[in-house]
Amino acid sequence: AQSVTQPDIHITVSEGASLELRCNYSYGATPYLFWYVQSPGQGLQLLLKYFSGDTLVQGIKGFEAEFKRSQSSFNLRKPSVHWSDAAEYFCAVGLSYNTDKLIFGTGTRLQVFP
Amino acid sequence: GAGVSQSPRYKVAKRGQDVALRCDPISGHVSLFWYQQALGQGPEFLTYFQNEAQLDKSGLPSDRFFAERPEGSVSTLKIQRTQQEDSAVYLCASSSLKLDRSQYFGPGTRLTVL
């Protein structure tokens, strides 16, 4: 069955430090991959997406992610974290371009210390 | 333009009551999705509409859950005879078939069943 794994439940970084959030997926066909961010009491905001083409994708708020087919991974990165980046981050895979249904990971909570 | 809106933002129901949750998608978005997010979990797919047609309802947990989108715009998720396990945040998302098909989420409705 299709699945998304985010191995890190909780990550703490210092402001200004670099960040990498891990995401692995299990899906037989070409995946469509997304990263969303959720602040407390808020809905999900789309950070970036991969449909095809260049495997390094740029998103909003200075985030980027790299699709590695050989590792079934789509890790999210940011070179310098800001305190406002503290939130819950979700990786998701789109199962089919026609169906568009998303399968989400369980999320990684990011804490940022000054 | 305006994003996805949902109402009410918070709903408290006594066990056994019926509830109706409303979603207003982004204007012109053909696709509409409902997800359920339990505490500490990632969102889980419930159902999908393309215009007024419900093309996928595989995620609805029981026949107590019913969704409709009669005019291809506003959607209502109805839960009959609510139970405590229905307590969750219900997220609505919409997307355009003409653009990048990314899903844009509303703020959610937090349902608490006592």
Image (tube, coloured by chain):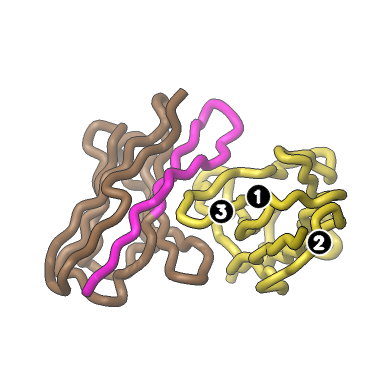
Looking at the rendered structure, which numbered label has been put on residue A38?
3
Q: Position of residue B80 (x, y in %)?
A: 16, 64
Q: Among all residues in the image, which is located at the extreme front?
A: A114
With respect to residue B39, does A70 lie above or below?
above
Q: Which residue is mark 1?
A: A34
Q: Is residue B103 left or right of residue B111?
A: right
SS under mark 2: strand
* Residue at 46% across, 55% down: A41
Mark 3 vs mark 1: in front = 3
Q: Colour of chain B?
A: brown
User: Residue A113 vs residue B59: left or right?
Assistant: right
The percent position of residue B44, horizontal first and vertical second, equals 46, 63
Looking at the rendered structure, the kind of residue marked 3 is Gln
> Can residue A53 be seen in the rendering of this structure?
yes
Q: Are marks 2 and 3 in contact (CB under 8 Å)?
A: no
Q: Which is in the foreground here, disc 2 or disc 1?
A: 2
